Image (cartoon, rainbow, N blue to C red):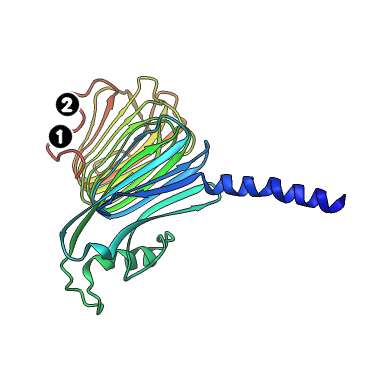
C-alpha cells in the first residue's frame, strides 16, 4: 500500500514538472534569422532584455504569455557568431544577445561582464579588435499585465508603450521612448528621452538621465511630486504645472514641489533642454521631434 502511494505521488509530480517546462517555448524560422521565445508569466514577475546592436520595441500582451521575437540582420560579418538566448529562473525571464565566441549565457549585470559581451562585436576569432562585423538583432516584445520590464541596449533605441507595471530602460547610443503607467529609470547617453505617464503618483523614485539629448516628460493633471534636477547646457521648460520652489534654484540646478508632492522625480542632462508638460498638451505628436523616434 505504501509503495502504491509513493508511485501515485511520483505520477502526480511528473505532469507538474512537465507543465513548468512547457511554460517556455522557442521556435526558429527556416532560414534561422528569426527566433520567437515565449513564456507564461505572472503579475510581479520580471522580464529582462539585453541587446547590443538593434532596436527593442515592447508593448502590452493580450494574455499571460510574454513573447519575444528576435530578428537577425547580417549586414557584414559572420552571422553565426551572434544569437539570442532565453534563461528562466524564479520569476525572472531573461532574453539577451550574446557573441558565441565570448560567452554562452546572459550577462549577470556586472559592468565588466557586460563589457566582455559587448566587446564581442569588435573582436575576431583571435581576439583582435578588427572584426568589423555589422549584425543587428531587432526585438519585438509583448509584455503581460503586471510584469516588470527591464531593458538595456548599447547601439539602438528602446521603445515601451501601453505597459501597466513599472519599467527600467537603459540605452547607450539611442533614444528612449516610454508611454505607460510608471517607470523607475529612463536613461541614455547619446539620445533623447521621451516619457508619457498615465499615473500622477507612484512609490519610489523616477530617475531620468541623459548626457547628449533632451528630456521631454508628460504627466496627468493630478501629478503630485517632489522634483530635483540639473542641466549644464539647456533650460527647464514648464508651463503646465505650478512648481513651488524648494531649496536651491538655478542656474544649473532646481528643486521644487508639484501639487502635494510625495512621488520623487530626479532629472538631469548635460547637453539638452528639460520639458515638463501635461498629458495631451504637447504641440508635437510622439516620434515627431527632430531627433527622431527609436534610434
SS class of the residue under badge 1? loop
Q: Return the residue nearer the eye: 278 or 126.
A: 126
Residue labelled with disc 1? 289
Instruction: Give above or below for 57 relative to 164.
Output: below
SS class of the residue under badge 2? loop
| Count of residue discs | 2
Instruction: Give above or below for 112 relative to 8.
Output: below
Which residue is depicted at the point 70% across and 48% down?
11
Which residue is depicted at the point 26% across and 77% down?
127
Q: Is residue 94 left or right of residue 236?
A: right
- Residue 29: give x, y in percent of width and height: 29, 49
Q: Return the residue nearer the eye: 243 or 220.
A: 220
Judged from this view, the residue extending furthest toward the bottom is: 126
First reached walking from the N terminus: tag 1 or tag 2: 2
Q: Return the residue nearer the eye: 258 or 246.
A: 258
Can residue 185 be seen here? The reply is: no
Residue labelled with disc 2? 284
- Residue 248: give x, y in percent of width and height: 34, 40
Label 1 – label 2 distance at C-alpha: 7 Å
Asked whether disc 1 touches disc 2, contact meaning CB atoms under 8 Å apart, the reply is yes
Q: Quadrant of the C terminus?
A: top left
Amino acid at each position: 500500500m505504501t509503495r502504491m502511494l509513493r508511485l501515485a505521488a511520483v505520477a502526480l509530480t511528473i505532469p507538474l514538472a512537465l507543465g513548468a517546462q512547457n511554460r517556455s517555448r522557442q521556435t526558429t524560422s527556416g532560414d534561422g534569422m528569426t527566433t520567437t521565445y515565449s513564456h507564461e508569466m505572472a503579475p510581479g514577475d520580471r522580464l529582462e532584455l539585453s541587446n547590443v546592436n538593434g532596436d527593442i520595441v515592447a508593448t502590452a500582451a493580450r494574455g499571460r504569455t510574454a513573447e519575444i521575437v528576435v530578428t537577425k540582420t547580417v549586414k557584414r560579418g559572420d552571422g553565426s557568431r551572434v544569437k539570442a538566448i532565453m534563461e528562466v529562473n524564479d520569476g525572472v525571464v531573461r532574453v539577451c544577445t550574446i557573441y558565441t565566441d565570448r560567452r554562452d549565457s546572459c550577462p549577470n549585470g556586472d559592468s565588466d561582464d557586460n563589457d566582455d559581451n559587448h566587446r564581442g562585436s569588435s573582436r575576431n576569432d583571435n581576439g583582435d579588435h578588427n572584426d568589423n562585423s555589422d549584425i543587428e538583432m531587432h526585438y519585438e516584445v509583448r509584455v503581460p499585465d503586471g510584469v516588470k520590464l527591464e531593458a538595456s541596449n548599447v547601439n539602438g533605441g528602446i521603445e515601451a508603450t501601453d505597459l501597466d507595471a513599472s519599467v527600467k530602460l537603459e540605452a547607450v547610443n539611442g533614444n528612449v521612448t516610454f508611454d505607460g503607467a510608471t517607470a523607475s529609470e529612463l536613461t541614455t547617453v547619446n539620445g533623447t528621452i521621451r516619457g508619457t505617464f498615465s499615473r500622477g503618483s507612484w512609490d519610489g523614485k523616477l530617475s531620468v538621465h541623459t548626457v547628449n539629448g533632451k528630456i521631454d516628460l508628460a504627466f496627468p493633471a493630478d501629478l503630485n511630486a517632489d522634483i530635483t534636477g540639473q542641466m549644464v547646457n539647456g533650460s527647464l521648460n514648464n508651463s503646465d504645472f505650478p512648481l513651488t520652489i524648494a531649496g536651491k534654484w538655478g542656474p544649473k540646478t532646481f528643486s521644487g514641489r508639484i501639487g502635494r508632492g510625495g512621488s520623487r522625480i530626479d532629472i538631469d542632462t548635460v547637453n539638452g533642454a528639460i520639458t515638463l508638460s501635461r498629458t495631451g498638451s504637447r504641440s508635437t505628436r510622439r516620434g515627431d521631434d527632430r531627433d527622431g523616434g527609436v534610434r
